[in-house]
Image: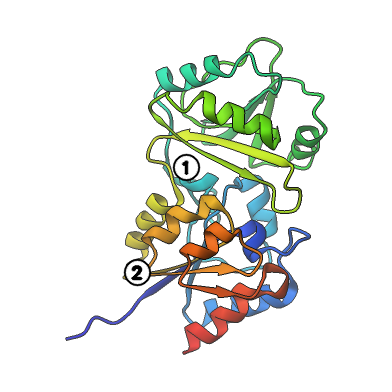
Amino acid sequence: MKQRKRTLYISDLDGTLLNNESRITSSTAQSLNHLIDEGMLFSIATARTPATVVELMSDVKLRLPVVLMTGALIYDIASNSYLSVSSFPHEISSKLLEATSDNELSPMVYYIDNSLLHVAYRHTTDKHQQTFMECRMGTPYKKYIEVEEKLTAHPNTVLIFFMGAYNKMQSLYNRIATIEGHRSYLYSDSLQPELGYLEIYPAGTSKASAIKQLAEHVGANEIVAFGDNVNDLPMFDIAHRSYATANALDEVKAHATQIIASNNDEGVAEFLKQDFRG
């Protein structure tokens, strides 16, 4: 007998589900809630942490755990608990920090301590990094720790994160290329292409591996993914169908099953209404 299709729909946030103001529109939230009430299995996979995701998704009645920090964490919003954490061996995170220690831009070191996400950082004059942190402080889901001395690796480190001029991020990316035990993502900001991000995760960390865990957890036998940037490509590779928004990078569009409307035109929500209801 033919197996009944049970589809997990999984969407990136920035540049995909969120509009250019980094918000979910009321109509998108309403559409998602109706579909979830009808039985749609829906979740998100993002580079963001609980500190911003909980607020951003507050109007959506998510019933499934979410994939955060590019797959380093699987987090259950309802119970405020981590179902899965991918962390560095101490030797590897120490080596990565040492290799980047003479860089003028200071990293942010993310680690789990007593079930709470912490971010260690040194004072910075970079305006982008200052704005980034100011927008994320004061939340119960993340604790920022300013250190005066050299940044060191912590137990349960899940991410070493740099942001700044894209060409400087490219130089850092090349510098750590020969160090084993990590998986790094270099990409530019979708709205400010001159701004770059370098995310350094433990080897094996990806949206793809976490989504496969989530799909098994909910008993899904089909994965449908939505994205716009290069860190979405691993989940495109394991998805049965993948959809790039019209604003996506050309490289991402080339890997997609199909191109849908842009993030500003509510492409994901409009597609889901057609696809889920058949």
Disc 1 residue crowd, few under 14, some 14–19, many 20+, Cα 10 Å: many
Quarter of image, res 102:
top right
For marks 2 and 1, the one nearer the N-term is 1
* Amino acid tagged 1: Ala
Q: Position of residue 103 (x, y in %)?
A: 65, 18
Q: Is residue 11 visible?
A: no
Marks 2 and 1 close (CB-CB < 8 Å): no
Q: Residue at x 29, y 82 (%)?
A: 4
Image position of 45 with respect to 7: above or below: above
Image position of 26 with respect to 53: above or below: below
Name the residue tied to disc 2: 220
Q: Residue 72: which disc?
A: 1
Q: Residue at x 50, y 64 (%)?
A: 254
Horizontally, residue 32 falls left or right of residue 70, namely right
Q: Is residue 271 visible?
A: yes
Which of these two is toward me, 12 or 53? 12
